[in-house]
Amino acid sequence: MNTPPPFNIDDIIAENHRRHEAQQEPYDPLTGQGCCGVRVHVAGKWLPRALLETVPGYASLPPLEQDRERIKHDFEFWCARCASIQDKVTNRIVPFVPNRPQRRVAAAMEQQRLTRHSVRLIVLKARQWGSSTLAILYMAWMQIVVHRNWNCLICSHQRGSSGNIGRIYSQLLRHYPAEMLDPGVKRLELKTLEGMRGVKELSPRGGIIVTGSASSQDAVRGFNLAMAHLSEVAFWKDSARHDPVDVMRTVEGSVMLGGDTVVILESTANGVGNFFHNEWLRASSGQSDKQPIFVPWHEIEIYQLPVADARQLWGSMDDYERELWNKHGCTLEQINWYHHKRKVYPSHNALMAEFPSNAVEAFDNTGCCAFGLESLDRLRDGCTAPQFKGDITSRGDGKNLQGIGLLDNTTGGLKVWRMPEATAMRNRYIAAVDIGGRSDKSDYSVITVVDRKELPDEKMEVVAQWRGHIDHDLLAWKAAQLATFYGHALLVFESNTLETEQNESDDAGYIAGTLARAYGNIYFRAKGRAGFHTNVHTKGLIVHHLIALVRDGQYIEHDQEAVDEMSWFALLPHGRFGAIEGKHDDIVMSRAIALYMASQLKRGRRFDYKEYCRAFDMQASQYRLHFDRG
């Protein structure tokens, strides 16, 4: 452990006291103090402005009538006045007073409902703060108080979990105060609809509650839903029979837009590349209709321990725990809890998976991503929309290098972030090709163009990319055209697919031979073979090189899809790198080849051919590179 820097314990204790006071801001949902939304202070209460504007003469109503009107506009008041839950510590039935994370999420829901007239959230959570309880009670408030005939869905990763969530609703109704019901209504109850398992009707309000699992999405078809709570989405099965995308399509198709509708996805993390992670990335980048909310462990009140000796605790803290103090604003009591909790787990990563401090930790430590997600977040900061999207063309049938130009087409596979610059530098641009399949269900073919820059201290940059499905001879010509467009770039093919084909037909020989004659700047390796051969040795070499570039911020990436692919590119159980099941890694491999070759040239010297031969398992006498390394 590093020697801790000098500190003044009195200053630390004083700051800790200030943080405690900030966390103890007054909150009383019965008076409205500290509650969300725009409020007006009237006679010792903080009332929603919408209530006072909607109910003229509210202040002159009898107290019970005031409460009945107020619950229609004040969710937090309704929680404390009407909703009861079972306390996890005492097991007693107590009024529901939202905790700190619940208040923050409730504020987001109400802000959306009152401004957008709909609620759309995706919640990434630490454990044990009542996310599902809040979502269920919010939908119950809408059904019991705000709307009639307002249908909802409760869907989890397995049917038993949905049933547990549904029991929260049943308990609410058993303890609902009779005086707060509509006139003439003695009680509310859930009635099972005849012949419909998992479907209950809220009588006499008329709304239905559908409970089910992600493995039975057909159960929600046919219902006109207004609300949906989708729980532990990261654990939904993803297979040929159970596709989370299909479940979500069914749900979204059943919930109308606007009009106080609600869709809430919530889950703890379960690795990267799955449906929940993809939806989180979409929401975080503003591409989704859902607002992302992350709840860290230190926002949950129960995670703290008294500190007997502040000086001893401070002296024992490592760099990460000091970051909890400096960056996250944790108290000593929270850090003391974390400090002791670490001893329970076999590794710090295991603890961060269960109790993340930020969203990156949540995903990074529940998966096996080859790239650190924090590094990928930094890489993602450089991602931008391309200045051109379309395709590259040439004269005639396209199998030539004459009259090359760009064809503007929003559905084309070519993205250009930087147009080629005039330069006297040989091989300033590298074009690397990862060859995929021809059909829509096969791997993609990807051409990556990297600018290795003229100045030694400038970062390499991805300036263009083509991605799509295409016959291999047409791909070869397209790559040569793009390389020509970028100043006669060094063209590097990943050769595995071509060499496999060469054993079965003469396609590979035709492609390599034709291009070698038409385009002179192609990378050749040993024995005059065109292309970069990816095997267990070379793949590890270029992937580890790419990991280091990403970690150290040594190249500029512009494509969101490239970073997405890196997030699910993993060290797989058999010890080799690749995409997790159901995902592609074509962009990653194209980047790895292009940036490796660019880095070697960027050194400003020739390859050390002995080192190269050892890496690629070839004899020195076989060494050959068919280009001027300049």
Image (cartoon, rainbow, N blue to C red):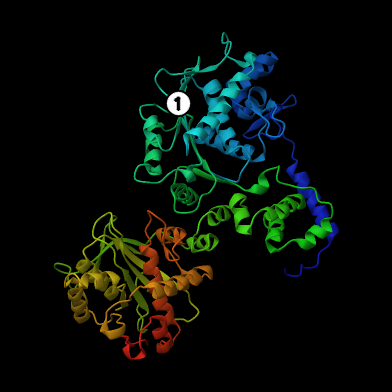
* Quadrant of res 255: top left
Horizontal placement of 604 versus 83: left or right? left
Residue 481 placement (x, y as % from top left): 25, 72
Q: Who's the residue at 34% across and 88% down the image?
A: 623
Looking at this view, is 294 or 208 the one in front? Answer: 208
Q: Secondary structure at mark 1?
A: loop
Residue 145 showing in the rendered view: yes
Instruction: Look at mark 1 in the image and give the residue it sits on.
Output: 198
Q: Position of residue 302 (x, y in %)?
A: 71, 42
Q: Residue at x 44, y 45 (%)?
A: 288
Asked whether, in this view, residue 183 is left or right of residue 214, the answer is right
In which quadrant will I find the C terminus?
bottom left
Question: Residue extending furthest top?
Answer: 184
Report whether residue 463 is seen: no
Q: At x 43% / y 72%, what residue is drawn?
A: 540
139 above or below 377? above
Quarter of the figure with the N terminus: bottom right
Report the amino acid beneath label 1. Answer: Gly
At which x and y percent is residue 144? 54, 21
Q: Is residue 266 above or below residue 2?
A: above
Give how far across and how far down residue 380 sits, in percent: 48, 60
Return the residue nearer the eye: 110 or 91. Answer: 91
